[in-house]
Image (tube, rainbow, N blue to C red):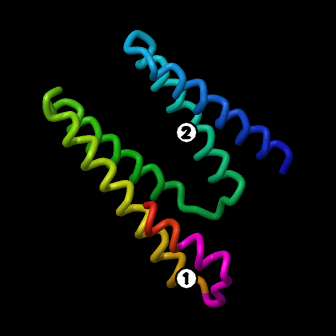
Amino acid sequence: MAWTNIFYVFAAVLFILGIKQLSHPRTARYGNMIASIGMLIAIVTTLVTYGQLDFKLIIVGMIVGTIIGATFAIRVKMTQMPQMVAIFNGFGGGASALVAAAEFTKSGDITSFTLSTIALSVFIG
């Protein structure tokens, strides 16, 4: 468990450094790369720690997401960027709501903590 915490802290540091680099156009690309590496470390750490997942399904999801993201990145003009960001934010909120709904239906014994996190996920989502 100690290694897990170390990797999570390292990922958080990369997120913070990446966000800091996003403050200037010259360093934004580098900051985006740093934050992406941090996200990859956090995802891999979570998958390895809590395992028992079908890695084929994860790889298929990553491939589909890459194709969709690359398609949007190539086709969208810079003047349409605010609309694309809004759509991606909507997708993120929808994904959060789906995770909350899955947790609500999966869990047989719902504690107040679980219910409050589900509510926060739906409202903030």
In-front residue for pair 7/80 = 80
| 30 to 49, vertically: above or below | above
Q: Residue furthest bottom?
A: 108
Q: Give the residue pinned by disc 2.
A: 39
Residue 34, percent from left and from top: 54, 25
Query: For the point 42% across and 19% down, which residue is it?
Result: 28
Q: What stretch is highlighted in magenta?
A: 108-118
The answer to whether residue 68 is above or below residue 109 is above
Count the numbered circles shown.
2
Q: Quadrant of residue 3?
A: top right
Q: What element carries label 1?
A: helix
Q: Residue 4's spot in the image, x, y percent?
A: 77, 46
Q: Residue at coordinates 67% horizontally, 46% vertically from top-left?
A: 45
Pointer 2 with pointer 1, Cβ within 8 A = no
Q: Circle 2 sits in a helix, a strand or a loop, which is it?
A: helix
Magenta-drawn stretch contains 77: no
Give the left or right position of residue 79, taking residue 64 as reference: left
The residue that mark 1 highlights is 106
For disc 1, the neighbor class at 10 Å (few under 14, some 14 to 19, many from 20) is few
Amino acid type assigned to the residue bearing label 1 in the image: Lys
Spatial CA distance of label 2 from label 1 is 26 Å
Extreme residue in the right direction: 2
